[in-house]
Each structure stands twice: as structure tokens, then as C-alpha cells.
Image (cartoon, rainbow, N blue to C red):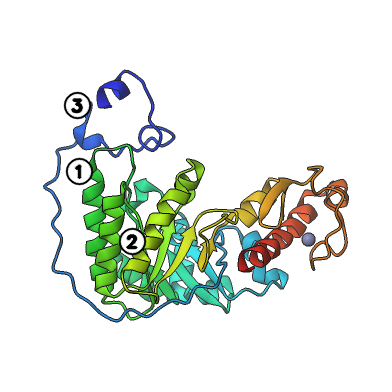
Amino acid sequence: MIFQCIKGVSYTGLTYPNSFCRLRVYCPKGGKPRPAPLQVGLLRSKKVAKVGFPKFVPQVDIRDSRSWFWRDGVDLPAIFAPLWQLLADEKALSEARSKGLHDYLGYNGEILLSTVMPDEMIDRLKTEDYFDLIKDLRPDAAMVPDNYTYTDVPLYQSWSQTIRLVNLANDFLDLDIPLIGLIKGADPHQIRWVIEKQVEMGYVSFAMPARELHREGLLKGWLRHVRQMLGGNHAMNNELLVYGVGQKLNGETHNMCYSNLSWFLEAKKSHCYKDGVFYEIIDPEIRYEECNCPACKGLMPQEIYDMRDRESELRILVVHNILDLANSLSR
Ligand SMILES: [Zn+2]
């Protein structure tokens, strides 16, 4: 693969679309020396508090207050706040650290801190950094630190990352807030192991970053495995949230929760949700259908489009989309 890469072939998740490559250690072109294999530490166990996910936990864009839906009168019980957005914005970070996330965002519901972040940022933070950030930001729950595993890299790489995730989940037991375990791995062995270890440590709430799997059409198969493994771990107490998928999945979705920012991202592209699926605002499927939600107030998408006012259109679509997703995902 590296030979092909040097010849100019791009691989999804490796050299494309990211400039950051996980195979650096194997690369004869400016590679770094290969580190010693990670070891699994002595794992502890504790009764980790359950988050109690609502069916739909919208993510917000911390840097774009147009996604702060509570300002538009929408009342939802919990949000995910992505840590990486703060790390990428020094000013926002220092303000959020001094006020705490609740005051910074002006949000009264539960704030769940998401550690899912771009690969190139993952290696920057150590356990102490996470602890300091969590102490200052004061979220109501926090996810264990993210890792990077890809199905098309050598297993050595993804096992190192998987072991790292389990070790960090072990460190996180020192925190006294509800914790969210992560379900990630490059193959079913890694997924099974990462779930087993976290369940043994006492984790009961889990998030599964699923955007790429969904895009590649692999999500349903993987979800079936994950649900079997979670159920098989004598824990009907476990809860599972699919992270990063912007539509309702068919079948096998009983008791599953969702989180995404799609309601906002799609609104920015003039896309309008109906029953958990998004359409272009002028799609014949929806354009002449009046909507009686508190944002549309009886308007049809065509009429919203005809306003020719991007800001008003965005305001309406943001609220319409989040309400549509909240309704269709809780059904
Ligand atoms: Zn509407």
C-alpha cells in the first residue's frame, strides 16, 4: 500500500482526503521510527453513572451561534458539544474555560462533551489535559477520548489505537461524572474487545461514531454485531447512541439513540427535512407541502425559497429541521 502511495495512489482515510497519514511510521519517505507496542494497563472497575440518552441528542457547532437552537425557543433536553471546535479556537476556549460550557452557551439542558475529533488533533491531548479541560468546562457527561482506526490499515496500527482507547477509558474512571464509552475498531475482533473491556470497567452508556461506516454502506452489518455484543454482556442496562448519522436508520434500531449536526449542516445547504430524511428545498417531493411547525407556520418550502432571503431561510430551516429530526427519531 505504501509502495502504491509513493507511486501516487490515494487511499480513503489515509492519504485522501486528509493530508495526515497514519502510516507515517512505515513510510520510507520521512517516516518516524516505529514506537514500541502499547500494553494494556491494569484495568479497574467501577459503577459508572448512566447518561440516559434522549432519543435525539443534537450536536451543536460551538463556534456558530446560529446552531444554538434554544435561542430560537426550541426545547430539547441534551446536546453534544464537540471539544475539538473549542481546541481549534483559542478565544472561544479560554472564554468557555473561565465560564463553563453552560454559561458560555447559555444552555440549561444537559451538555455532553464529545471527544470525537479530526485525527490530526487526537495525539495532542494526554489524560491530564482532558481532566483539566473537563474540570474547567464542567459538562454533565464526557465521552472517553477518541482514537483513529481504519479498516484499510495494518492491524498493528488499529490495535495500538484500540489499546490506547481502553487505557484512557480506564484513566477516565477517576472522573465523577457520567461517562460515555466509545465503540470503535477496525474489525469485529477489535469492536468486541473494546466493548468487553469497557463493560468490565463498568461503562453502560456507549456512542458509536458511524458517519464513515454509514457512508460506505457498512453500518447496518456492524450495528447488528455491536448490539449482539452489548446485549450479550448481560447488560440490558446498556444504552447505545449512533453518532454522526443524519437520518433515521431502518430496522434494528429499537432503543437506539442518535446524535448529529446534520439538521444544521443541511439547513446551511438549503436542505429541508421531512420524516427524518432531507430534501432540497425545491424538491418536488416536498416543495408544495405546507408545514405547520413553529418555524414554518404554515408556509411551504417553495414559499420559504421564494423569500430570496438566505438568513431568514436559514433561520426557518434550522428550527424546522431540528424539530423534524427530534420528532421522527423519537417515534
Ligand atoms: Zn416546518
Picture quadrant of residue 283: top right
The residue labelled by disc 2 is: 145
Percent of width and height locating residue 132: 32, 71
The answer to whether residue 299 shows anywhere in this view is yes
Point out the tag, 2 or 3, that comes first from the N-terminus. 3
Percent of width and height locating residue 157: 23, 44
Label 2 packing within 10 angstroms: few (<14), some (14-19), many (20+): many
Q: Secondary structure at mark 1?
A: helix
The residue labelled by disc 1 is: 156
> Could you tell whether 322 is left or right of 205 in the image?
right
Q: Nearer the viewer, mark 1 or mark 2?
A: 1
Q: Nearer the viewer, mark 1 or mark 3?
A: 1
Point out the tag, 1 or 2, that comes first from the N-terminus. 2
Percent of width and height locating residue 59: 54, 62
Which dot marks residue 28? Answer: 3
Mark 1 residue type: Tyr
Which dot marks residue 263? Answer: none
